[in-house]
Amino acid sequence: MKRIDERAADELRRVKITPDFMPNAAGSCFIEWGNTRVLVSASVKEGVPSFLAESGRGWLTAEYAMLPGSTGTRKARERGKADSRSIEIQRLIGRSLRSVLDLEALNGFTITIDCDVVQADGGTRTASITGGFVALGLAVKRLIREGRLEKNPIKTYLAAVSAGIVEGRALLDLCYVEDSSAEADMNFVGDEQGGIAEIQICGEKRTIRDEEFAALLGYCKKGVGELIRKQKEILENA
């Protein structure tokens, strides 16, 4: 079976991350991942949610939305209330990024990661997490430069990628056409040390065998490593 874009089974689509895409944000990037495009920004405010008052910890939260025109038919704006899919994805983004944060080092600040999908072609949540980490890293660097943070609260690099079983074959980084026909799909969030923040796996049309899961896991860890190298190129030179 040939993939529609002739990639190898374990090959990512082309990923381009443009940092500081929104000058008014504390940190931002525009991530282009194949034909998926997501605008990501990080905003910082002093203060924390009430459940963290007097805790000596900061907080990170996320919001996710698909803009009108991002899909083949117009996506209605989520005015005041996100749909259930958006809520699930933004919770995933927040959990993932918090997993590599020292919240005590972020004491007194709340960072909000906003992910707006400009164009969707599969992997919008993984692009949002990967780009969200870049926006977060840029925002933290700015806080340190301004003397508002004493130390970097980011413990390690983090990225996310998808994979799936299509026509009985494990494939990395599914585009929309592949994802829509997949027998099973998986979203993987991992760190630089090989640790796992989250795995979401679903047998859409059948259950998954051990050897298939092992293949998906291996492909995803390889993909995350490649994505983290791209993140490092940006953040180490910021």
Image (tube, rainbow, N blue to C red):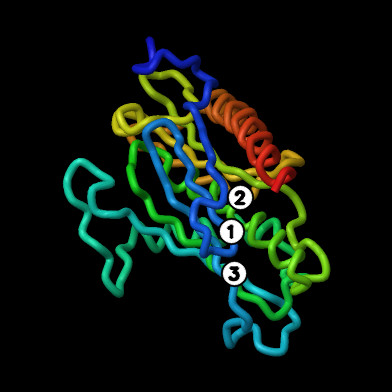
Q: Residue under circle 2?
A: 134
Quarter residue 194 falls in: top right
Q: Residue at coordinates 50% horizontally, 46% vertically from top-left?
A: 200
Q: Earlier in the sequence, mark 3 or mark 2?
A: 3
Q: Earlier in the sequence, mark 2 or mark 1?
A: 1
- Label 2 neighbourhood size at 10 Å, few (<14), some (14-19), many (20+)? many
At which x and y percent is residue 189?
59, 45
Q: Residue at coordinates 76% horizontally, 65% vertically from top-left?
A: 144
Q: Is residue 168 left or right of residue 211?
A: left
Report the Cα–Cα distance between label 2 and label 1: 8 Å
Which element carries disc 1, helix, strand or loop? Answer: strand
* Residue furthest out toward the front: 23
Report the Cα–Cα distance between label 3 and label 1: 10 Å
At which x and y percent is residue 156?
75, 50
* Residue furthest out toward the left: 73
At which x and y percent is residue 133?
61, 52
Which element carries disc 2, helix, strand or loop? Answer: helix
* Residue furthest out toward the right: 150
Q: Earlier in the sequence, mark 3 or mark 1?
A: 1
- In this rendered view, identify the residue nearer to me: 147 or 45: 147
Amino acid carrying label 2: it is Val
Evaluate if marks 2 and 1 touch, with contact meaning CB atoms under 8 Å apart: yes
Report the Cα–Cα distance between label 3 and label 2: 13 Å
Amino acid carrying label 3: it is Ile
Residue 27 has which mark?
1
At which x and y percent is residue 37?
40, 42
Quarter residue 182 falls in: top left
- Is residue 169 shown above or below 236? above
Amino acid carrying label 1: it is Gly
Residue 111 has which mark?
3
Residue 203 has which mark?
none
- In this rendered view, identify the residue nearer to me: 113 or 189: 113
